[in-house]
Amino acid sequence: MSRPSLPLLRYVSLLRGCVMTTQGTAESFRVFVRNWWRWESAYGVPDARYPNVPRTLIGRHLVPDPGARKTTLATRCAEQEAQTLAKRYNAEHKPGPLSRKAEYESE
C-alpha cells in the first residue's frame, strides 16, 4: 500500500510524532482522535405498584460526549503539519456512528 504524499512536508509516522519543519515557530500542536458521541442506555420508568420488578431496558441512543478520552496521534507539530495529519486521518478513516475524528490543539 503506497502512502499518500504530503504537500510541502516529508512523510512523518503518526506514531513517532511530528518534526517541526517550520523554523522559528514557538507554538506546537498535538494531533488526537476522539469520539464526539457515546451510547447511553434508556430505561423505562418502574411501576410503583410492582416495586420488586426492575426497570426494563427500552433501548440505546446517542448523547454528546464532551469529556471523551483523547488518543494522541502526534505531538510537537507545526500548525500546518497538524492540519495535514488530521485531514489525512479523517479522509482515510470512516467516522462511524460515534463520529470518531482527528483534531488538533495547542500544547
Image: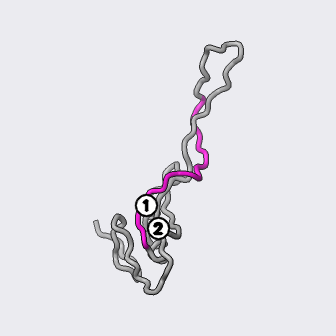
Residue 68 spot, x, y in % from top left: 53, 51
Above or below: residue 66 compared with residue 41: below
Say which of 61 and 24 sits in front: 24
Q: CA distance from mark 1 to mark 2?
A: 7 Å
* Residue for badge 2: 30
Q: Are marks 1 and 2 in contact (CB under 8 Å)?
A: yes
Residue 36 spot, x, y in % from top left: 55, 53
| Quarter of the image where one finds residue 46 | top right
Above or below: residue 41 compared with residue 3: above
Q: Earlier in the sequence, mark 1 or mark 2?
A: 2
Is residue 57 found inside the magenta-colored segment of the image?
no
Residue at image location 35% in from the left, 79% down from the top: 10
Residue at image location 44% in from the left, 57% down from the top: 71
Residue type highlighted by circle 2 = Arg
Region of the chain picked out in magenta, as a range? 58-76
* Residue for badge 1: 72
